C-alpha cells in the first residue's frame, strides 16, 4: 500500500504555484527537448521544429480542454464555464488527439512527411504523459475503485487504485520500447503507430479501474476512443511490414 498524496501548491511569498501546473509545464518542456533532438536526427530544420512546438502546445491545450468538456458535459451550466480553463479540467487523450491534428496540419503546411514528424513526436509524448501524470499523482487526482492491490493508496479509510500511477508506469515502458525500436531500421510511421497501439491498449485497461466517467454501451467515452485507435493502429501494423528490406 502506498501513501496518499494531496500536494496541491507551493507557496512562494504571495505567489502560489500549482503543482499540477508545474508538472504540466515541465512535461511540455521535456517533451519539446526530446522532440527537437529527434527531428534533428532526421535532418529537419530546428526552426521548423520550434515553430511546430508552438502549434503543438496550443493544440494540446485546446484538445485536452475539448476532450474534458465532452466527457463532463453535466458539470457545465453555461457556455462561459467551458472557457474557464484556469479552474482545471484537461483530458490527456484529448490533448493527444489535438497534438496529432497539429502534426498533420504542420506537416502539410511545411511539406514534410507526416510520419517523420509523428515518429519524432511519439517518444516525446510518452515522456510528457509520464511527467504530467506525476503531477496528477502528487495532487491526489484520478483515484479509482477499491482494491487490495499492493500499489493501491489508502484514502478515506479504504485502499483504492491510483490510476495516475499506473499511467506513469505504462508511459515509461512505452518510452523504453520506442527508444529501443528507434535504433532499428524501421519504415516511416512505425514508431508512431506502435506508440498509438500501446498507449491506447494501456489506457483502455486503466479505465476499468477509474470511477469518474459514465459508461456508454459497455465502455466509457475514453474507452471508445481507445478502441477506435487500437483497431486502426492494429490494422496498420498487420497490413504493413515496418522492417526495411
Image (cartoon, rainbow, N blue to C red):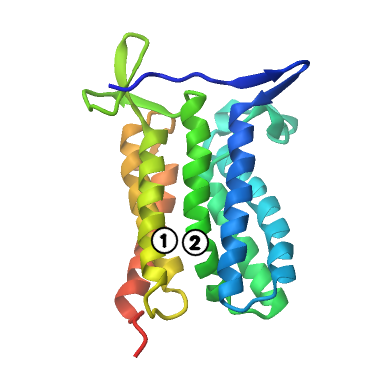
Q: Position of residue 120 (x, y in %)?
A: 53, 67
Above/below status of 117 relative to 13: below
In the foreground, 156 or 22: 22
> Relative to 185, is 141 on the left or the right?
right
Could you tell me which residue is drawn at 32 percent across and 33 percent down?
209
Residue at the image point whose x is 39% and y is 35% from the top: 165
- Image vertical order of residue 224 relative to residue 35, above or below: above
- Quadrant, the N terminus: top left
Residue 227 visible to the viewer: no
Residue that badge 1 annotates: 195
Is residue 35 or residue 58 the one in the foreground?
A: 35
Task: Give the residue at mark 2.
Answer: 122
Image quarter in which the C terminus is found: bottom left
- Which circle marks residue 176 in the picture? none
Residue positioned 36% across, 19% down in the render? 3
Q: CA distance from mark 2 to mark 1?
A: 6 Å
Quadrant of residue 10 within the rendered picture: top right
- Element assignment for label 1: helix
Amino acid at each position: 500500500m502506498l501513501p496518499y498524496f494531496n500536494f496541491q501548491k507551493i507557496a512562494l511569498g504571495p505567489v502560489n504555484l500549482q503543482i499540477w501546473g508545474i508538472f504540466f509545464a515541465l512535461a511540455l518542456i521535456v517533451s519539446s527537448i526530446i522532440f527537437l533532438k529527434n527531428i534533428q536526427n532526421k535532418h529537419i530544420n530546428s526552426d521548423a521544429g520550434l515553430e511546430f512546438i508552438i502549434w503543438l502546445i496550443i493544440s494540446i491545450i485546446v484538445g485536452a480542454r475539448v476532450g474534458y468538456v465532452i466527457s463532463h458535459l453535466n458539470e457545465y451550466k453555461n457556455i462561459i464555464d467551458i472557457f474557464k480553463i484556469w479552474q482545471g479540467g484537461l483530458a490527456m487523450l484529448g490533448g493527444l488527439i489535438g497534438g496529432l491534428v497539429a502534426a498533420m496540419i504542420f506537416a502539410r503546411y511545411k511539406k514534410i512527411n507526416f510520419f517523420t514528424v509523428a515518429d519524432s513526436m511519439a517518444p516525446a509524448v510518452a515522456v510528457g504523459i509520464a511527467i504530467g501524470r506525476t503531477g496528477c499523482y502528487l495532487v491526489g487526482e484520478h483515484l479509482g475503485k477499491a482494491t487490495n492491490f499492493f500499489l493501491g493508496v489508502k484514502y478515506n479509510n479504504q485502499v483504492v487504485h491510483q490510476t495516475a500511477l499506473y499511467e506513469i508506469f505504462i508511459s515509461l515502458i512505452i518510452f523504453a520500447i520506442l527508444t529501443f525500436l528507434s535504433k532499428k531500421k524501421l519504415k516511416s510511421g512505425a514508431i508512431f503507430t506502435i506508440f498509438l497501439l500501446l498507449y491506447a491498449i494501456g489506457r483502455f485497461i486503466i479505465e476499468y479501474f477509474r470511477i469518474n466517467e459514465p459508461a456508454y454501451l459497455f465502455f466509457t467515452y475514453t474507452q471508445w476512443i481507445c478502441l477506435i485507435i487500437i483497431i486502426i493502429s492494429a490494422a496498420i501494423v498487420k497490413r504493413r511490414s515496418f522492417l526495411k528490406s
